[in-house]
Image (cartoon, rainbow, N blue to C red):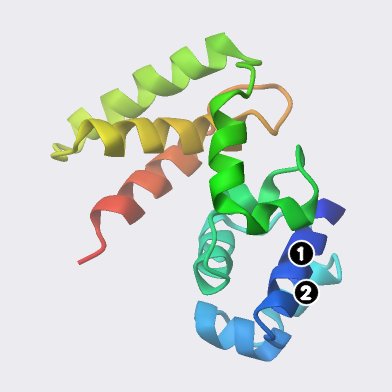
């Protein structure tokens, strides 16, 4: 596990005055699951676990995994939004691939979606996929994200 993920989870837990057990309870995870992530016993937490942790900590997976800013910066959402607007597009081919494949997945699943929902999903898939080598779209994450967005009810 990337140490910045561990640091960001811990920092957000401390800011919200949450114990590991309380975070696990709020996230709906099994006992010791967060502890195992923090201790490095789980090297690659699932997207579902990360999403549950992020929701319990009232942030996004991107906030937890974002290594471009210091952990304390993530507590200033307005500043983060302004910074993201000026972030250089490092992998334009990856963004194009994400946009095309997300659109295909949405159409294939016959989901009705707004332009904002589409761009938000593309952005999340792009940021998630840009963290791995080789830099290519993580279709499993994209599929999971789309299903979690549209199966809320």
Residue drawn at (70%, 76%), measured in percent from left and top? 15
User: Vertical placement of 3 versus 105: above or below?
Assistant: below
Residue drawn at (67%, 90%), measured in percent from left and top? 21
Residue drawn at (41%, 30%), measured in percent from left and top? 122
Q: Where on the picture, by quarter, is residue 36?
A: bottom right
Q: Are marks 2 and 1 in contact (CB under 8 Å)?
A: yes
4 relative position to 116: left or right: right
Position of residue 91 measured from the top left corner of the image (x, y, whole percent):
62, 14
Position of residue 143 measured from the top left corner of the image (x, y, whole percent):
39, 42
Give the tally of numbered discs: 2
Residue drawn at (60%, 43%), measured in percent from left and top? 80
* Mark number displayed over residue 3: none
Q: Residues within 10 Å of mark 1 (few under 14, many from 20)?
A: some
73 relative position to 126: left or right: right
Give the residue at the far top of this rendering.
93
Q: Nearer the viewer, residue 81 or 37?
A: 81
Query: Is the C terminus in the top left, top right, bottom left or bottom right quadrant?
Result: bottom left
Q: Where on the picture, by quarter, is residue 17?
A: bottom right
User: Vertical placement of 118 versus 71: above or below?
Assistant: above
Q: Where on the picture, by quarter, is residue 113?
A: top left
Residue 1 shows up from this direction? no
6 relative position to 98: left or right: right
* Mark number displayed over residue 42: 1
| Disc 1 secondary structure class | loop
Q: Nearer the viewer, residue 123 or 81?
A: 81
Q: Earlier in the sequence, mark 2 or mark 1?
A: 2
| Disc 2 secondary structure class | helix
Residue 123 shows up from this direction? yes
Position of residue 86 measured from the top left corner of the image (x, y, whole percent):
60, 23
Residue assigned mark 2: 36
């Amino acid at each position: 596990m990337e140490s910045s993920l561990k640091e960001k989870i811990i920092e957000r837990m401390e800011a919200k005055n949450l114990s590991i057990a309380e975070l696990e309870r709020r996230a709906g995870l099994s006992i010791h699951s967060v502890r195992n992530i923090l201790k490095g016993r789980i090297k690659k937490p699932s997207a579902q676990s990360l999403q549950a942790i992020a929701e319990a900590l009232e942030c996004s997976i991107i906030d937890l995994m974002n290594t471009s800013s210091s952990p304390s910066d993530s507590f200033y959402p307005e500043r983060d939004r302004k910074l993201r607007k000026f972030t250089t597009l490092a992998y334009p081919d990856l963004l194009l691939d994400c946009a095309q494949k997300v659109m295909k997945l949405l159409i294939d699943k016959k989901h009705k979606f707004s332009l904002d929902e589409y761009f938000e999903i593309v952005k999340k898939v792009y940021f998630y996929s840009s963290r791995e080598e080789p830099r290519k779209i993580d279709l499993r994450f994209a599929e999971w994200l789309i299903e979690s967005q549209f199966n809320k009810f």
